[in-house]
Amino acid sequence: MTTLDKLLGIDYPIIVAPMFLISNTKMVKAALANGVTAAFPALNYRTDQELRAAIANIRAASDKPFGVNLIVNKSNPKYKGQLQTLLELKVDFIITSLGSPQEVIEKCKPLGMKVFCDVVDLSYAKKVEALGADALIAVNNRAGGHAGKMSPKELITLLKEQCTIPVISAGGIAHGRDIKEVLSWGAAGVSVGTIFIACEEADISPEYKQAMVDYGEKDIVMTTKLSGSALTVINTPYVQQLGTKANWLERLLNNNKTLKKYVKMIIAYRGMKQVEKAAFGATYKTVWCAGPAIEHVHSIRPMGEIVQTLTKEFMESS
């Protein structure tokens, strides 16, 4: 089996997951300096100039491989331009989300760029494998953000039995022994997000970081209010007040085939702005994404220290 570390030429089979509004160059550089890889969402940079500058900044600090997450859905009006930039700069890998990765795969292959695709079930996994994806990011029901519906073991086992490309498990990783466990089920590596949110390098509000310490797994709830798709968030007083279910109008529009494309864009834009406001300024409208691994966040620490703890635990786990 080709593990993620062999696939990318890194020390440990770990990706620091791309997190909307959270991932930044400081976090990526700290990850690369400590033997793992990382990715950031292209949408974290508003202009093409900022995206190019971020990639240049990381490359100036490290020659290790890193990736960029690309929303390939029509709800992302910047998709075409972002893809062109990533192709021109030849980033090491692209993680595709929320749409067909066909164009990305077809354009990356000739350049030797790898494409990993977010999947939540076997049907979609088979489709992206047929298109030529290099690996599957198996998003399970323990993931933060847009989570899947299957348990980590169930999803990994199913994909390993039915697909031939590497499976990278995403969701629920908080300790080195968690990595050993998913590798024993057949995973080639892991994508880890939640435990890195409360790092010193993250440019989010101190209140968001403190919430990562103060709240636990029991406080994580699913909401369809933000993006039209189920999203895991911390159950703050504001989220309790807002409710977690889309209202009848949101549901009606979201399910109308004619309007769906446009409504998705409106809901996604509205939701992203709401999350953006919560991430960068403490207001009573706090909508903060996190996964169940929040249970294992006990302090705000430097990024490198969190990575080192995770890799040490991984090496020491039997």
Image (tube, rainbow, N blue to C red):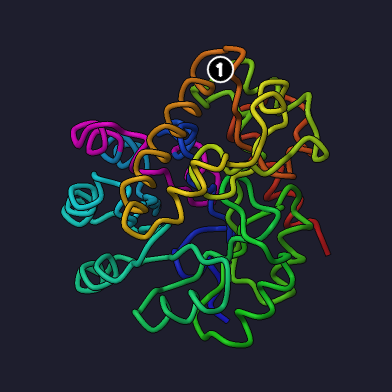
Q: Position of residue 291 (x, y in %)?
A: 68, 43
Q: Position of residue 241 (x, y in %)?
A: 69, 23
Quarter residue 286 falls in: top right
What residue is drawn where x is 74% and y is 44%? Answer: 292
Q: Kindly tell me whether residue 5 is visible in this rendering.
A: no
Q: Position of residue 73 (x, y in %)?
A: 34, 56
Instruction: Check disc 1 and give the amino acid type.
Output: Ser
Lateral position of residue 88 relative to residue 316, left or right: left
Q: Position of residue 188 (x, y in %)?
A: 59, 71
Q: Kindly tell me whether residue 114 is visible in this rendering.
A: yes
What residue is drawn where x is 70% and y is 52%? Answer: 173
Q: Nearer the viewer, residue 204 or 38?
A: 204
Which residue does the numbered mark 1 point to in the structure image?
205
Assess whether residue 37 is covered by the magenta stretch.
yes
269 relative to 265, above or below: above
106 relative to 53, above or below: below
What residue is drawn where x is 69% and y is 79%? Answer: 157
Q: Nearer the viewer, residue 219 or 228?
A: 228
Lateral position of residue 292 relative to residue 257, left or right: right
Q: Nearer the viewer, residue 257 or 231?
A: 257
* Quadrant of the image containing the C terminus: bottom right
Assess whether residue 138 is covered by the magenta stretch.
no
266 relative to 100, above or below: above
Helix, strand or loop at label 1? It is loop
177 relative to 18, above or below: below
Question: Which residues make up the magenta segment?
Answer: 29-54
What residue is drawn where x is 72% and y is 21%? Answer: 237
